[in-house]
Amino acid sequence: MIPRVLTVAGSDSGGGAGIQADLKTMLAHGVHGMSVITAVTAQNSLGVQGAWELPVAAVRAQYRSVVDDIGVDAVKTGMLASAELVEAVAELISSTDAPAVVDPVGVSKHGDALLAASALESVRTKLLPAATVATPNLDEVAQLTGVHVESEDDLRRAAAAVLEYGPRWVLIKGGHLSGDAVDLLTDGSAEHWLRAPRHDNRHTHGTGCTLASAIASGLAKGLTVPEAVAAAKEYVTGAIAAGFALGGGIGPVDHGWRFRG
């Protein structure tokens, strides 16, 4: 059977991030992608012009419809918008026998808020404890823990702060630091440092969604967490290198870069 991966996230009408990026990434990894839409955004290369969250009942119904009939081998979460949605999704993934990759989306690439401030405590106390792997970037680390990462040396401190909320593993994404793109994956004992050259390309919309979906795809295929994260890092690095202009602002990474010869 083809591995089944479910994304629970918002829709990006511009196609570079969110549900659209997730499904493209899953296709590129040879898994069957399925979706639970939590919010609809009016979004393009310039930013987010509007966002409308779906009712909790609609999100719950989508999830149960997919999982109860088709089943799932891994779940990935993205934009959850409100405390009510965060808590509902945390409950759903906690009751599902599959690894969960939690991307605690706080703001868009353009700096637009995608999570209500009132939802932060729900992310800390409900969602992160349900995560097999949490994948915060440095802004999200600061938002959730108050730890501000200024250099590689701070990544361990950031990881420890996130792990206190209960995820089994945390991947601290150091992409906003200078120099090579350095990430730290740890469960509190084992450490895996992932390094990649930084590509001089501003078209990086969707990197976080793409990375989390690639990790979930690897887990669904039976890889260990370190194996899935390493493979996802390699895929995202190639997608960033091939990112392309679209519209008048920041274009997306290229989810199909491996197919372009």
Image: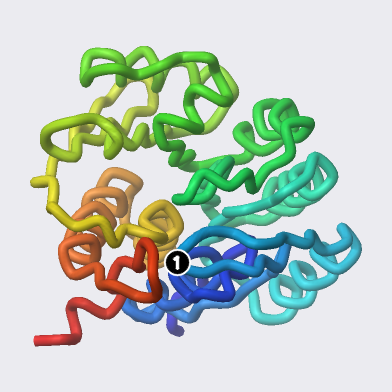
Q: Is residue 81 above or below residue 74?
A: above
Position of the C terminus, as image quadrant, is bottom left
Residue 61 is situated, as x and y percent measured from the top left of the image, at 84, 70
Q: Residue at x 74, y 67 (%)?
A: 63
Q: Is residue 86 above or below residue 188?
A: below
**Which of the 4 image quadrants contains residue 165?**
top right
**Which of the 4 image quadrants contains residue 60?**
bottom right
Residue 39 is situated, as x and y percent measured from the top left of the image, at 72, 63
Residue 65 is situated, as x and y percent measured from the top left of the image, at 78, 76
Residue 147 is situated, as x and y percent measured from the top left of the image, at 46, 14
Q: Nearer the viewer, residue 186 or 173?
A: 173
Q: Nearer the viewer, residue 102 or 252?
A: 252
Q: Amino acid at mark 1?
A: Ser
Q: Which residue is mark 1?
A: 45
Q: Residues within 10 Å of mark 1 (few under 14, many from 20)?
A: many
Q: Secondary structure at mark 1?
A: loop
Q: Residue at x 48, y 65 (%)?
A: 17
**Which of the 4 image quadrants contains residue 153?**
top left
Q: Residue at x 43, y 34 (%)?
A: 169
Q: Name the side, left or right, on which 199 lies relative to 94.
A: left
Q: Nearer the viewer, residue 63 or 16?
A: 16
Is residue 164 visible to us here? yes
Q: How is the image coloured?
A: rainbow
Position of the N terminus, as image quadrant, is bottom left
Q: Name the side, left or right, on which 162 lies relative to 69.
A: left
Q: Residue at x 90, y 63 (%)?
A: 57
